[in-house]
């Protein structure tokens, strides 16, 4: 599925399973595909996203189309994930990009808040790496001065 099609889908339905701030919107991203951007200046510690999905096992994740798979899964417990199972379940929160120098942080495992004030039209990013050299590896496109180039997810 092309990013323009996904953008059209999430513009029509920005929220499927989780929460997304009305002060954000999905746009094409210079980091990777689509990203979440601020529509106004956001203060520090503002909730901008809470991920949702369906409880999915590792075996079920392995059976999903590659376009979904681990790309949109958050680990609940070893072997269990909160995930979307089809492209139509993807929403704006699923397109938050990783950065090695993020402007948001993840608290309580599934809630993303701003880590500092964020200017209007800035892309919202979080550090999704598990900070080990184990798990699924992905090339990082964040462009930060401290970019690790490869990041790992469980």
Image (cartoon, rainbow, N blue to C red):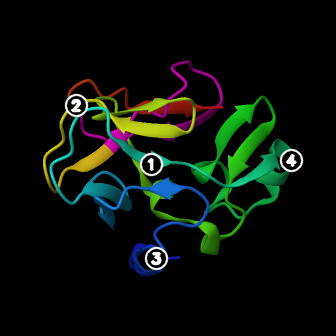
Label 1: which residue? 49
139 relative to 54 in the view: left or right? left
- Compare marks 3 and 4 and give the one earlier in the sequence: 3
Q: Give the magenta part as a residue range.
A: 125-144
The tag earlier along the polypeptide, 4 or 1, is 1
Between 72 and 48, which is closer to the camera in this rendering?
Answer: 48
Q: Nearer the viewer, residue 89 or 79?
A: 89
Image x and y of residue 132, in percent: 56, 18
Q: Which of marks 3 and 2 is nearer the N terminus?
A: 3
Q: Label 2 belongs to which residue?
A: 116
Q: In x, y percent, where is residue 48?
A: 38, 47
Say if the magenta span includes residue 129.
yes
How far, Cα to Cα, is label 4 from label 1?
27 Å
What kind of element bears circle 2?
Answer: loop
The image shows residue 74 at horizontal and vertical percentages of 63, 41
**Cβ–Cβ under 8 Å for marks 4 and 1:** no
State the SS at label 4. helix
Alpha carbon distance from label 4 to label 2: 38 Å
């Amino acid at each position: 599925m092309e990013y323009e099609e996904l953008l059209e889908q999430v513009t029509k339905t920005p929220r499927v399973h989780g929460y997304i701030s009305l002060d954000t919107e999905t746009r094409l991203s210079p980091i990777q595909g689509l990203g979440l951007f601020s529509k106004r200046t956001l203060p520090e510690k503002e909730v901008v996203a809470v991920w949702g999905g369906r409880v999915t096992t590792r075996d079920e994740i392995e059976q999903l189309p590659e376009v979904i798979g681990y790309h949109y899964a958050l680990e609940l417990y070893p072997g269990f994930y909160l995930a979307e199972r089809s492209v139509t379940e993807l929403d704006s929160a699923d397109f938050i990009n990783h950065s090695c120098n993020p402007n948001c942080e993840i608290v309580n495992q599934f809630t993303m808040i701003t880590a500092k004030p964020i200017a209007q039209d800035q892309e919202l990013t979080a550090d999704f790496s598990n900070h080990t050299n184990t798990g699924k590896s992905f090339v990082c496109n964040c462009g930060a001065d401290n970019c690790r180039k490869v990041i790992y997810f469980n």
